Each structure stands twice: as structure tokens, then as C-alpha cells.
Image (cartoon, rainbow, N blue to C red):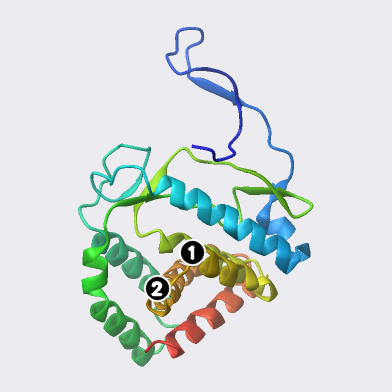
């Protein structure tokens, strides 16, 4: 498909040679975007964003999924509608903010999700690379070398990937590099309405991320501030 992934050196998925399946891949030189982003120029971020979006456009040309969610290409997703995934993620996120957000703030989230229900219901099961965010994107000196960890894809709304990237940048303490999100949105030619969807998804991701900071108080507070800012901007 023209996407730079690790070369397969050898594999045996039958278990014929050894009593286990294996696949050995050639290592792509470089580091995750997480480690490179802070030193990248806007020109480098723009070039990277254009590449990532082009990969998503290629994958989106695959047949629509038979269901929604995270599965190997062509397998049937476990969800019947994208709305079910959103409902699950919002539910899990709200559990993390009980006692942290006010009843008014939680009410605003629930009201926004209810208003967006028609949008979620209309999402088609489009194939996209869900985790080419601040990880799994390998760069060397700010130049893309390839992408990894593609054992599964997601069928649903590709905007979910941009929002996950945005939340990851905040969680990683790289807010000054938010230009990369703008570069992704520009390369994807997102409309104003799509940008608002990205922001809502980012809020949901951020609430879920709050559950990952048991031993990282600064990360927790940074992400919580982002959650509150997202809620305040809901319209």
C-alpha cells in the first residue's frame, strides 16, 4: 500500500518449525515522535503531518468494515455502531472524573454527547490507523522513517486518531508543539465542524488518560486542566 512499515525478515505463523508462532522484523532506525517532537521545526511537522494523512487516505480506500472497532484488516469489529464505542469511552472517562468535575461540568459533557448522537450514528466503518500518534511514528532527526505496531486497525471515524494525538501531546507535556495538530487538520482539510468533533473526542480521551497517572501528579494535573478547558469551550 506504499506505507513504510518494518520489513519482515522471516516468519512462521503455522507453528510447524517451533511450538509457537513468530515473526522477526527489521528494526526501523529512529525514535517515537514523542521523543522527536520537541526539537522539530514547523516545516518538519508539516511534512510529517502530510505523510500521516496520506497514509490514512490510502487505508481509507479499503472496503468498509463489517462492524466497528479495533481488529485486523477485514475482520469484523465487535461493535455494531460507532455510537457504542463513544458511549463506552464516555462512560469510562466519566468514572475517572467523579468527584473532580462539578455536576455542571459533567452535565455539559452529557448534553454535548447527546447533541452529537446523530453524527456518531452516521459514522461509517472507515478503516484508519488508530495509533499513529506520538508513538509508533518513527523519526530520525525529525524525518519520518516509518510506522510500527500495525497488528490491527480501527473501523470508524478517522478523526479519532487526530484527537488521540492531541491528547497525547498534552499528556506528554508537549503543549508547545500543538502546531502539529494544526498541521494534521490542515493536511486533512478539516471543516470547522470536523475540528469541533476532534476537540470533543480529545476531551473524551483526556478523561480516560486521567486513569493512567497514578504515579504522575504533574501529568494528571496537566491533563485535568486540559479536560476543564475542553469543557469550557463546548458550544
Q: Measured from the top left, where is residue 125 in percent x and y?
A: 28, 52
Between 221 and 65, the residue placed more toward the observer is 65
- Total labels: the figure holds 2
Give residue 3's mark.
none
Residue at horizontal 45%, vertical 90%? 232
The residue at which mark 2 appears reads as: 194
Q: Measured from the top left, where is residue 56 in percent x and y?
A: 47, 52
Using the image, determine if residue 65 lies above or below residue 7. Answer: below
Q: Measured from the top left, where is residue 73 in percent x and y?
A: 37, 38
Along the horizontal axis of the image, is 190 left or right of 6?
Answer: left
State the image quarter where residue 223 is shown: bottom right
Along the horizontal axis of the image, is 78 left or right of 191?
Answer: left
Q: Secondary structure at mark 2?
A: helix
In the rendered structure, are the residues bearing label 2 and label 1 in contact, judged by CB atoms less than 8 Å apart?
Answer: yes
Give residue 188's mark.
1
Q: Secondary structure at mark 1?
A: helix
Between 187 and 150, the residue placed more toward the observer is 187
Q: Measured from the top left, where is residue 68 in percent x and y?
A: 28, 51
Between 143 and 115, the residue placed more toward the observer is 143
Residue at horizontal 31%, vertical 65%? 86
Amino acid at each position: 500500500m506504499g506505507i513504510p512499515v518494518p520489513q519482515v525478515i522471516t516468519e512462521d505463523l503455522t507453528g510447524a518449525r517451533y511450538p509457537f508462532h513468530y515473526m522477526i522484523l527489521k528494526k526501523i532506525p529512529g525514535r517515537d515522535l514523542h521523543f522527536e517532537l520537541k526539537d522539530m521545526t514547523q516545516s518538519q511537522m508539516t511534512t510529517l503531518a502530510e505523510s500521516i494523512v496520506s497514509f490514512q487516505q490510502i487505508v481509507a480506500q479499503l472496503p468498509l468494515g463489517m462492524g466497528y472497532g479495533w481488529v485486523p484488516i477485514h475482520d469484523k469489529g465487535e461493535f455494531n455502531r460507532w455510537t457504542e464505542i463513544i458511549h463506552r469511552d464516555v462512560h469510562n472517562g466519566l468514572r475517572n472524573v467523579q468527584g473532580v468535575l462539578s455536576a455542571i461540568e459533567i452535565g455539559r459533557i452529557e448534553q454535548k454527547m447527546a447533541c452529537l448522537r446523530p453524527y456518531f450514528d452516521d459514522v461509517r466503518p472507515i478503516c484508519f490507523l488508530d495509533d499513529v500518534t506520538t508513538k509508533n511514528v518513527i523519526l530520525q532527526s525529525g524525518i519520518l522513517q516509518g510506522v510500527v505496531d500495525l497488528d490491527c486497525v480501527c473501523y470508524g471515524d478517522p478523526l479519532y486518531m487526530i484527537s488521540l494525538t492531541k491528547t497525547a501531546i498534552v499528556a506528554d507535556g508537549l503543549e508547545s508543539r500543538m502546531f502539529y495538530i494544526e498541521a494534521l487538520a490542515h493536511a486533512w482539510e478539516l471543516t470547522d465542524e470536523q475540528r469541533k468533533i476532534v476537540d470533543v473526542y480529545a476531551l473524551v480521551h483526556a478523561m480516560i488518560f486521567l486513569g493512567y497517572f497514578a504515579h504522575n501528579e504533574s501529568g494528571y494535573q496537566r491533563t485535568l486542566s486540559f479536560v476543564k478547558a475542553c469543557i469550557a469551550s463546548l458550544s
